[in-house]
């Protein structure tokens, strides 16, 4: 058996599989199917300073190889998360990542400060949500915006800080470099790609929010390309995600440069995917004589 442990910014994950934010809630439903200790970690649903109802429905649409969502950060608020979800999550034997989103810079700083007093293992800064009117992606699409918010949050965040990047930019490597220079310990990518569908009978957009974020297998090649670009540009670890649905996808994203892999949309189709992916990855490592999964990170051969 290969060693599946990965160490990222001082946090030890027992394997490189992490549930992606917004696709695993706070873990309660999945814990009825299998022990959450099977996962390397959980990135929790994005929380905001105050509770949010999210966007009005319809807010999910199927696409040929994935889905469009415009959930709009429905969540119970950071205080509820800290009081009601975190203590339970910390007993599940997996690393817990708090994903935060805000309307303003002050929101982000205040949440980072609160979470620094708790047992969360890492904070993931979501500056890439395409589905909210204020905040979210508006901080994440320019180098100055990313640098400003990362530097501000860094002052308040005493946990390892992972900055989650948007693919809806011209040069993701420059954005990642901006996060690194402002004090990020890790970058994660990709969030969803902005998309839109129209109902040809009603001639209205399928989603009430008009646009939504595209995720699932359709975005996987984009994720591989961007993870590679970012891996080559920055020295901090890269956590990869976007359309991973099998163990071979996970291996591929690690070869591109990911130190760990988050999985999201596949969980809606197969909630057991993390178990299957970990098992398949393990077999692949054994068959190829690889002793540590971390040896895959960035090991793609250039032509
Ligand atoms: C329904 C849904 C809700 C999401 N909510 C969040 C969120 O709250 N915070 C966040 O950072 N990303 C959120 N995401 C983005 C995912 O974490 C992930 O970056 C993206 O879906 C790409 O990975 P995937 O193709 O494996 O799903 C959400 C995605 C989906 C499909």
Image (spheres, rainbow, N blue to C red):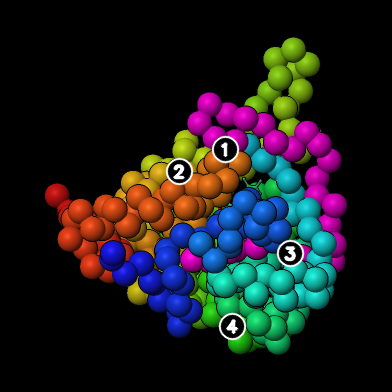
Residue 233 shown left or right of residue 50 in the figure: left
- 1 and 4 marks in contact (CB < 8 Å): no
Residue topped by disc 2: 245
Task: Give SS at disc 1.
Answer: helix
Pair 4/2: label in front: 2
Q: Is residue 152 above or below residue 163?
A: below
- 2 and 1 marks in contact (CB < 8 Å): yes
Q: Is residue 137 above or below residue 115?
A: above
Residue at x 37% of width, y 61% of height: 258
Mark on residue 97?
A: none
Which quadrant is home to the N terminus? bottom left
Whichever of callouts 2 and 1 sits on the residue coming sooner in the sequence is 2
Residue at x 49% of width, y 57% of height: 262
Give the alpha-carbon distance from disc 3 to disc 1, as whole Å. Answer: 24 Å
Query: Can you tell me whether the CB of the residue at mark 2 lies under 8 Å from the nearest atom of ligand 1?
Result: yes
Give the alpha-carbon distance from disc 3 to disc 4, as whole Å. Answer: 16 Å
Pair 1/4: label in front: 1
Residue 157 shown left or right of residue 10 in the figure: right
Whichever of callouts 3 and 1 sits on the residue coming sooner in the sequence is 3
Residue topped by disc 3: 47
Magenta stretch: includes residue 40: yes
Q: Residues within 10 Å of mark 1 (few under 14, many from 20)?
A: few
- 3 and 2 marks in contact (CB < 8 Å): no
Helix, strand or loop: magenta stretch = loop
Residue topped by disc 1: 269
Task: Give SS at disc 3.
Answer: loop
Q: Please tell me in which quadrant of the rendered image residue 84 appears.
A: bottom right
Whichever of callouts 1 and 4 sits on the residue coming sooner in the sequence is 4
Which range of residues does the magenta coloring cover? 39-67
């Amino acid at each position: 058996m290969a060693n599946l442990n990965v160490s990222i910014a001082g946090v030890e994950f027992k394997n490189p599989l992490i549930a992606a934010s917004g696709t695993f809630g706070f873990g309660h439903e999945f814990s009825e199917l299998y022990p959450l200790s099977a996962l390397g970690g959980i990135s929790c649903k994005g929380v905001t300073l105050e509770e949010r109802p999210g966007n009005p429905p319809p807010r999910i649409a199927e696409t040929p190889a994935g889905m469009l969502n415009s959930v709009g950060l429905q969540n119970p608020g950071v205080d509820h998360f800290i009081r009601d979800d975190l203590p339970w999550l910390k007993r599940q034997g997996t690393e817990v990542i708090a994903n935060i989103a805000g309307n303003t810079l002050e929101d982000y700083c205040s949440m980072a400060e609160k979470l620094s007093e708790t047992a969360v293992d890492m904070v993931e800064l979501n500056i890439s949500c395409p589905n909210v009117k204020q905040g979210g992606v508006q901080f994440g699409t320019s180098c100055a915006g990313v640098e400003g918010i990362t530097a501000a949050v860094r002052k308040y965040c005493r946990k390892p800080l992972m900055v989650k990047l948007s693919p809806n930019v011209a040069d993701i490597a420059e954005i990642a470099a901006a996060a690194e220079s402002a004090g990020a310990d890790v970058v994660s990518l990709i969030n969803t790609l902005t998309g839109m569908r129209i109902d040809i009978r009603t001639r209205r957009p399928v989603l009430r929010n008009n646009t939504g974020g595209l995720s699932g297998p359709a975005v996987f090649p984009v994720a591989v390309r961007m993870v590679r670009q970012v891996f080559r540009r920055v020295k901090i670890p890269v956590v990869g995600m976007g359309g991973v649905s099998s163990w071979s996808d996970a291996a591929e994203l690690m070869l591109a440069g990911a130190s760990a892999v988050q999985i999201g949309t596949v969980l809606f189709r197969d909630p057991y995917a993390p178990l299957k992916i970990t098992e398949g990855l393990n077999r692949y490592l054994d068959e190829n004589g690889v002793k540590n999964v971390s040896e895959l990170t960035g090991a793609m051969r250039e032509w």
